[in-house]
Amino acid sequence: MPRSSPSTATPDRWTRAALWVLCAFTAFTIAGYASFGLHPQLLARVPQVAGLYGIAFRFFAVGHVLIAGAVLALFLVRHAGARWLAAFAALYGISLTSELLGTSLGIPFGEYAYTPLLGIKWFGLVPLVIPLSWFFMALPSYALALRALPGPDAAGRRVLLASLLLASWDLALDPAMSHATKYWVWGEAGPYYGMPLLNLLGWYVTGLLLMGALAALRAESWIRDLPHRWLGAFYLANLALPLGMSAAAGLWGAVAATVAALAAAYGVARLLAGRVRGARLVEVRA
């Protein structure tokens, strides 16, 4: 049976339905935040909702990560079998280590701490769901970079591009989760909605480690066969939550920065792809 290419592989109806569930949950969460989260006086008008919303506020962030993780796991099991498990273990371990260093030593993100809103924590520092969120955004970032730079001679460029796609997510995530809400707090206020600029460097460096691990594991051997359009939609569905919350809270600078970063990533992809093609032409002529 011939291997599928990213342009011909298609998701099955179960993974399409699961993605729609994630999208619906995302929309419901944003709507709840935009109404009751930003206008708590509405709760006074509907007192029976007040207690429910207090529980929901804690549930929705954790629930979104768990649902997104389950949706991606279903997709990977149906399209890659068990081949993705080594990558999951590696990326979970790398991101957990990076987060433990950040929450204990302030390296590489700056000083910060997670509040109790994200549930049970590793060693009382890092919520269990946080490394899962790194994985489910790192994988589609790598897949999109692979689609843009598919050649075996583009591995290094692919890692750089995928890390940029992953870091773009944080430009909306941090304002939404540490400024508009308080899922984590910074030890020292920074210029970007309270976030220190060191955090962006930390995100990119951590992204390099994650993408480097995927490259070292030769994950492209099975990622190449996945329906990349589904993974692109999955990336956007997860980006929509912090982006929608930032927009609802009026953090338009965060929205603009995220869109600009994605546009820059697209430009970088075109530039790197052009350089790869140019290098191949030189080799052919030689």
Image (spheres, rainbow, N blue to C red):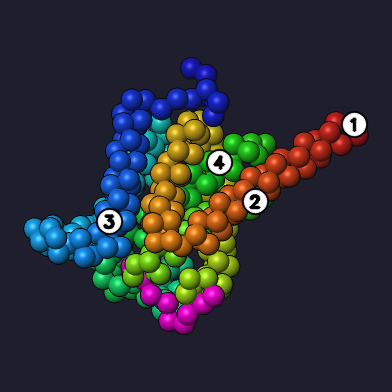
Q: Mark 2 points at which residue?
A: 264
User: What residue do we see at 42% from left, 77% from top?
Assistant: 186
Q: Which of marks 1 and 2 is nearer the N terminus?
A: 2
User: What residue do we see at 45% from left, 25% from top?
Assistant: 10
Look at label 3 and name its amino acid.
Answer: Ser
Look at label 1 and name its amino acid.
Answer: Arg
Q: Mark 2 falls on what kind of element?
A: helix
Residue closer to the observer: 144 or 83:
144
Separation of residues labelled 1 and 2 (CA atoms): 32 Å
- How dense is the environment of label 2, judged by Cα within 10 Å: few (below 14), some, or many (20 and up)? some
Q: Mark 4 points at which residue?
A: 144
Q: Earlier in the sequence, mark 4 or mark 2?
A: 4
Separation of residues labelled 4 and 2 (CA atoms): 14 Å
Magenta extent? 183-191
Q: Mark 3 falls on what kind of element?
A: helix
Q: In this view, does 244 lie above or below 150?
A: below
Q: Earlier in the sequence, mark 1 or mark 3?
A: 3
Q: Which-is-in-front pick, marks 1 and 4?
A: 4
- How dense is the environment of label 3, judged by Cα within 10 Å: few (below 14), some, or many (20 and up)? some
- How dense is the environment of label 4, judged by Cα within 10 Å: few (below 14), some, or many (20 and up)? many
Q: Which-is-in-front pick, marks 1 and 3?
A: 3
The residue furthest left is 48
Q: Would residue 160 be seen by someone viewing this image from the given angle? A: yes
Q: Which-is-in-front pick, marks 2 and 3?
A: 3
Q: Mark 1 falls on what kind of element?
A: helix
Q: Name the residue under label 1.
A: 285
Q: In this view, does 170 lie above or below 122?
A: above
Q: Which-is-in-front pick, marks 4 and 3?
A: 3
Q: Would residue 67 be seen by someone viewing this image from the given angle? A: no
Residue closer to the observer: 117 or 134:
117
Q: Which-is-in-front pick, marks 1 and 2?
A: 2
Separation of residues labelled 1 and 3 (CA atoms): 62 Å
